[in-house]
Every structure is written in structure tokens, then in C-alpha cells.
Image (cartoon, grey):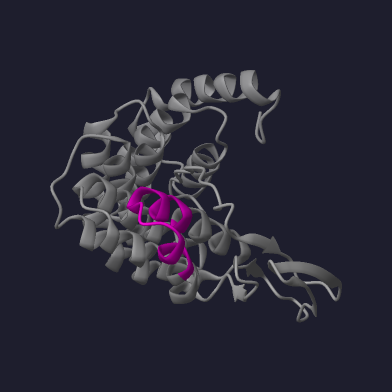
Amino acid sequence: MEAGQIHIPRSIPTSLHRLNGRKIKLDLKINECGVTCMILPINFEGFIAPEGELVSIEDVDRILSVLTKHTENIHEIVQSLWAFAGECSQAGYFNAAIGYYEKIFLLVDKPGEKAECLLAMGQVWERAGDYQSALDVYSRAFELPQKPDIVWYFLHNNSAFCQNLEGRHQEAEVHCRAAIEIDPDRFNARKNLALAVQGMGRYAEAAKSFVDAIMACPGDHRALGHLEDLIAAYPDILEQEPGLLEQLRKCYAAVKSIRGKTRIQ
């Protein structure tokens, strides 16, 4: 996946004890009267609530109910929901992850927090390979007030990434340029801009944008691979852009300084 990612670590509340799916016997102290023993279901992923109830990590409504029962602090609840959403996304429980993010979206008030939530939600859909659903989520963000920060950079960039995959290159170009205006030093939007203009047949311009992306982040090999593929498919651009060959040599040198060697010498 070539869209940008933002990882924000969160923590699981201590009121919920994590269980992983194994056939094991657990001694669970569920109240002051004594101890209860139980067998976990096979492949169970979830938690033990303070009362001893097994709660699946995919049961978004029940998890939220447990959280709200044990704290009225909205910030703590939101932080916990972020943690659950992240775990579900990593485990491939994409619908549950989306469910947690939707709860967060309703609980937070600030536009920036809502935008961050929608960005994370779109990234889940991208992870699931559902790029149209990702675009639908990102479009909700553009109804909010915008700020020139990293969240909005990636909302524009990731929208462009998905639009390129859907063949919507003109729209992708607009979002890429908006992202570059927010942060011209990041490589993500420059690479996606190159893919957008390449998709519209502007190959020399695409080559320049690939070069910009490579020089901005020589450690990311994808832009160089795209540039090599572009030149292999349309070698005439080396003649149309006399300085491109020298720029390509500089790209190889920059990449080599990062990883020791390049795919093509």
C-alpha cells in the first residue's frame, strides 16, 4: 500500500483484562465471594469485564457499554476506543475497527479530532482493499474546517492515492497539490502526483515528480521503481527532457547512499 499512515499509540484500559484464543482453563476472581473457572472458546479474542463477563473485541457496542459503566471521563473512553480500533485493524477485524472509529467520531467535538478519526477510518478501508469506501470516508472529512497540518496532508494524499487506483487522476492531482502546499518536503504526495499526471499521459511531468519524491525520501524505493518503469515504457522522455538522465543519476546516488545499491546501475 502506498498511501500515508499515521500511527498514534493508545492504551487498553486496565478495567478490561485481555484474553487470547486458546483452550485453557482460567481461574477468574469475579467477585468477593470466590473464584469461578471457565474454558475459553477456540480463537476467542476479547476481554474479561470487571464482572467476569467475556466480551469479544468485535462487540463494539458491548465494549462501549462496559467502558461507560466504569468511567464518565469522555477522554478516557475515547482513548480506549482508539486502542480497540487499532487492535481490530491490525487483526483484520475491519468492520469492528470501523465501528470503534464511528463511536469516536460521535464522541469527539473538535473538527481536528473528527478529521483524525476519519483519516484512521479511511486507512482501515485501504487496509481492507476497499478504496471506494475509503474515499467515501475521506469525503466526509472535507465537510469539516481544514487546517494545514499532518492530518490534512494525509487526508489529501490518501484521497489522491485511492483516486489514482480508481482511475480518477484529475481529482487526484488536485488533492496532491493541496497536500504539497501543506508540506512540500514530504515525498508521499509528490509520488502520488507523479502517478496522477502519468495516468493523464503527461510523462515528462510525471518523471520530474518522481525525481522530487525520490530526493525527498531516498529510503522509499517505490518512486524509483515507478520512474524506472516509466522510462522503460516511454524512453523518448529522456530526449524530451535533456536534464532527466542527470537527475536520474543523482537519484541513484541518493538511493545508494541509503541502502548500499540500486536495482539498476
Residue 239 spot, x, y in % from top left: 39, 32
Relative to 38, say whether 15 is above or below.
above
Relative to 239, say whether 197 is above or below.
below
42 sits left or right of 149 in the view = right
Q: Quadrant of residue 22?
A: bottom right
Residue ranking furthest to the right: 24
243 sits left or right of 149 in the view = right
Seen at 31% across and 53% down, the residue is 160
Q: Is residue 72 magenta?
A: yes
Q: Is residue 202 visible?
A: no
Q: Is residue 118 visible?
A: yes
Residue 197 spot, x, y in % from top left: 30, 48
Frontmost residue, 107 versus 174? 107
Seen at 28% across and 55% down, the residue is 200
Frontmost residue, 80 versus 230? 80
Q: Is residue 95 magenta?
A: no
Q: Quadrant of the C terminus?
A: top right
Residue 12 spot, x, y in % from top left: 56, 52
Q: Which residues are magenta?
A: 66-81
113 sits left or right of 71 in the view = left
Residue 123 spot, x, y in % from top left: 43, 57
Frontmost residue, 100 versus 25? 25
Residue ranking furthest to the front: 33
Seen at 63% across and 22% down, the residue is 258
Seen at 36% across and 48% down, the residue is 75
Q: Quadrant of residue 45?
A: bottom right
Report the label total: 0
Frontmost residue, 53 versus 119? 53
> What is the chief secondary structure element of the magenta stretch?
helix
